[in-house]
Image (cartoon, rainbow, N blue to C red):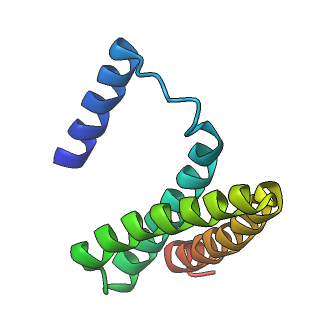
Amino acid sequence: MIAVLGLVVGVIVGLVVQPGIPTALVPYLPIAIVAALDAVFGGIRAMLDGIFDDKVFVVSFLSNVVVAGLIVFLGDQLGVGSQLSTGVVVVLGIRIFSNAAAIRRHLFRA
């Protein structure tokens, strides 16, 4: 219940304050969101499998976002940012769909 309350408060504050994103960070935001979604789906899968650990989840969440952002940043510096961005999205997308399939199998026994 605390998490839901925190989510509601966060959405309301975000809508009221309307924070701006620095233009230098805009190319990395979609990658960070996909990396965060990968960690969230992995956490849900771990919870359903009965092996969830909050410390592992936090470290996974933060490291996914940082590593994905660094890979894209390195690609930008080397002049291949769009190719590395595509690669990161494909790899994380595969992981997200793999976790989603495991969640579906667990929930629907299918």
Estimate the x, y position of residue 53 in percent, counting from the top left: 25, 79
Residue 46 seen in the current view: yes
Along the line of sight, which residue is nearer the eye, 16 or 25? 25
Query: Residue sitting at 31 percent across and 85 percent down?
Result: 50
Count of marks, rendered view: 0
For the C terminus, the image quarter is bottom right
Identify the residue at the far top of this view: 16
Identify the residue at the far left of this view: 2
Estimate the x, y position of residue 22 in percent, counting from the top left: 51, 29
Query: Residue sitting at 77 percent across and 68 percent down?
Result: 87
Q: Is residue 6 above or below residue 58?
A: above
Along the line of sight, which residue is nearer the eye, 92 or 19? 19
Q: Quadrant of residue 101?
A: bottom right
Estimate the x, y position of residue 9 in percent, counting from the top left: 25, 29
Query: Residue sitting at 46 percent across and 67 percent down?
Result: 39
Along the line of sight, which residue is nearer the eye, 85 or 108? 85
Query: Residue sitting at 39 percent across and 73 percent down?
Result: 60
6 horizontally vs 46: left or right: left
46 horizontally vs 101: left or right: left
